[in-house]
Amino acid sequence: MAETKNIRELVDVIRSKNAGPYEITFDFIFKSFDIYEKVKASKVINERLIAELYDIAIEDVISVINYDQAKAIKATIVRPRSSGAVGETDVYGAQQHAPLLSIEVPWERSKYEED
């Protein structure tokens, strides 16, 4: 059975925030460039996963982008309701990251990693 690591072990920051009134963006900022490269190569953070985690159509996932210089991955989705609309519960989009905390990343242990 393949080993996995939870995303929380691999990042310094997971956050959500507004990307305008009609979109929410999610940032994964990794602890090191090596970790970032492993996660990026696994392609586990993709449009399909984000759609499943947020129970939205894949068409509502605007993008999943790798930012090599920042050792980060950014995903952006259409907001279910525009920021500040009636019934909208998070005007800043800052409380929407919780589903991302369950992501499991395939992980092949290096011979140099400690137990």
Image: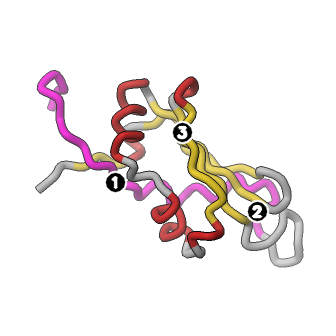
Residue at the disc numbered 3:
66
3 or 2: mark nearer the eye: 3
Mark 3 and mark 1: span between their CA atoms?
Answer: 18 Å
Secondary element at image label 2? loop
The amino acid type, in three-letter code, at marker 1 is Glu
Which colour scheme appears in the figure? secondary structure
In percent of width and height, residue 104 lies at 34, 54
| Residue placed most toward the observer, 106 or 48 | 48
Q: Is residue 58 left or right of residue 103?
A: right
At which x and y percent is residue 96? 63, 59
Tell me the kind of residue under disc 3. Asn
Image quadrant containing the C terminus? top left
Instruction: Point out the frontmost of discs 1 and 2.
Output: 1
Q: Which residues are magenta?
A: 89-115
Q: Quadrant of residue 14?
A: top right
How many circles with numbers are drawn on the protein? 3
Residue 13 percent across, percent down from the top left: 54, 38
The amino acid type of the residue labelled 2 equals Asp
| Residue 53 or residue 90, whichever sits in front | 53
Are the residues flagged by discs 3 and 2 in contact, CB closer than 8 Å? no
**Residue 74 percent location from the top left of the image:** 59, 44
Measured Cα–Cα span from mark 3 to mark 2: 26 Å
79 relative to 102 in the view: left or right: right
Q: Residue at x 37, y 31 (%)?
A: 35
- Examine the residues drawn in magenta and state their main secondary structure: loop
Q: Secondary structure at mark 1?
A: strand
The residue under label 2 is: 90
Q: Quadrant of the N terminus?
A: bottom left
> What label does residue 104 carry, if any?
1
Q: Is residue 105 magenta?
A: yes
Which residue: 62% across, 53% down?
A: 63
